Image: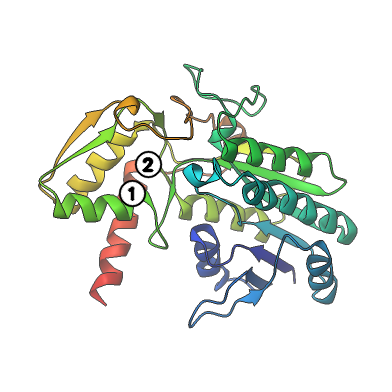
């Protein structure tokens, strides 16, 4: 039986893993910095290396899944210290403890490590050139993990959403229901990804001992979309009559520079893990149906 530590256990990915863990015979420890009402959460500050070490040794942890991150892309531009602490230093702490305990560390990263100048999907060994504080600190976290002595798998993902927490899908469901018209950026291209897809891969890797060698992988849902395509699909699936119109990034100036094209090549993850990836719109329909079922309870 494995002893698995999950950081960011109350977030989107952590919650999807929590749901999947109900069918596991392993011991899962879901941790976060705050408790969540009605859900068992172990309090753990991943910026405190000694606290991580003590928790890992006490519970004989053999696998660490790092779902915690500073993900406020705009806020990060004015909060480098906090963003770096959570995205780089915390990853370094976890890697150090994983090495000490001979544990496998699964690190989650982002498409924002690329500058978006490609015209074909990014492969894992393409040069990283992050444009934002968020992207730079996440890539620094990748480097900290890769340069440690621990066993690790890094999964880069993109445009994550789920029925939990705050995310683009839930915002667009609300706005397309309330507004007659809406403008959404159409010149940023990537792939919407259900947190359930990534959680399912991580769960499969951990439960079935699919780790063989350390490395970095790309995992998003299949297909390509702009934020406009994404929002339009949400409105249509929900049956809302909002007139969703495309616009340009420059129409909505922001502090953080986003990559204009950040589609990720998933050939490696499919080859090495034999993982079946859903088309993004199919996964979106499943998520929206889950949200409707939750709201009807």
Which residue is rendered at x = 47% and y = 31% of the image? 258
Secondary structure of the residue carrying numbered label 1: helix
The answer to whether residue 235 is left or right of residue 30 is left
Which residue is rendered at x = 53% and y = 67% of the image? 10
The answer to whether residue 95 is left or right of residue 161 is right
Label 2 Cα crowd, 10 Å radius (few <14 / some 14-19 / many 20+):
many
Observer-nearest residue: 184 or 297?
184
Which percent across, then down, holds residue 261? 45, 25
Q: Is residue 213 in view?
A: no
Which residue is rendered at x = 30% and y = 63% of the image? 291
Q: Which residue is mark 1?
A: 284
Q: Is residue 155 above or below residue 174?
A: above
Label 1 Cα crowd, 10 Å radius (few <14 / some 14-19 / many 20+):
many
Observer-nearest residue: 242 or 202?
242
Q: Is residue 253 above or below residue 54?
A: above
**Which picture quadrant has residue 207?**
bottom right
- Residue 294 is marked as none
Rendering colour mode: rainbow
Which percent across, then down, holds residue 175? 21, 51
Q: Is residue 218 in view?
A: yes
Q: Residue furthest front?
A: 78
Q: Name the quarter where the C terminus is drawn.
A: bottom left
Which percent across, then down, holds residue 75? 50, 46
Q: Is residue 42 above or below residue 228?
A: below
Distance Cα–Cα, label 2 vs label 1? 6 Å
Q: Answer whether labels 2 and 1 touch (C-beta < 8 Å).
A: yes
Secondary structure of the residue carrying numbered label 2: helix
Q: Which residue is mark 2?
A: 280
Which residue is rendered at x = 52% and y = 58% of the image? 13
Q: Name the quarter where the N terminus is drawn.
A: bottom right
**Which picture quadrant has residue 42?**
bottom right
Which percent across, then down, holds residue 72? 50, 48
């Amino acid at each position: 039986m494995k002893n698995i530590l999950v950081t960011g256990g109350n977030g989107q990915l952590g919650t999807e893993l929590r749901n999947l863990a109900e069918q596991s015979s392993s011991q899962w420890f879901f941790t976060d910095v705050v408790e969540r009402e009605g859900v068992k959460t172990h309090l753990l500050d991943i910026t405190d290396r000694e606290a991580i070490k003590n928790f890992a040794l006490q519970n004989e942890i053999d696998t660490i899944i790092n779902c915690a991150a500073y993900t406020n892309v705009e806020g990060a531009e004015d909060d480098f210290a906090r963003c770096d602490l959570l995205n780089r230093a915390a990853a370094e702490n976890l890697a150090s403890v994983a090495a000490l305990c001979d544990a496998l560390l699964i690190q989650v990263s982002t498409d924002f490590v690329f500058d978006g100048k490609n015209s074909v999907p990014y492969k894992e060994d393409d040069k990283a050139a992050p444009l934002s504080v968020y992207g730079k600190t996440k890539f620094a976290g990748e480097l900290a993990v890769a340069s440690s002595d621990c066993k690790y798998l890094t999964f880069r993902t993109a445009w994550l959403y789920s029925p939990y927490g705050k995310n683009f899908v839930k915002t667009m469901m609300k706005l397309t229901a309330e507004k007659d018209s809406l403008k959404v950026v159409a010149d940023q291209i990537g792939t919407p990804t259900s947190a359930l897809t990534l959680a399912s891969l991580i769960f499969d890797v951990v439960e079935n001992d699919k780790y063989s060698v350390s490395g970095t992988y790309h995992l998003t849902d299949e297909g390509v979309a702009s934020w406009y395509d994404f929002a339009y699909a949400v409105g249509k699936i929900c049956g809302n009559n909002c007139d969703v119109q495309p616009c340009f990034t420059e129409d909505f100036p922001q502090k953080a520079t986003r990559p204009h094209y950040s589609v990720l090549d998933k050939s490696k993850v499919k080859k090495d893990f034999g993982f079946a990836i859903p088309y993004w719109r199919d996964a979106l329909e499943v998520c929206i149906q889950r949200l409707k079922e939750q709201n009807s309870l």
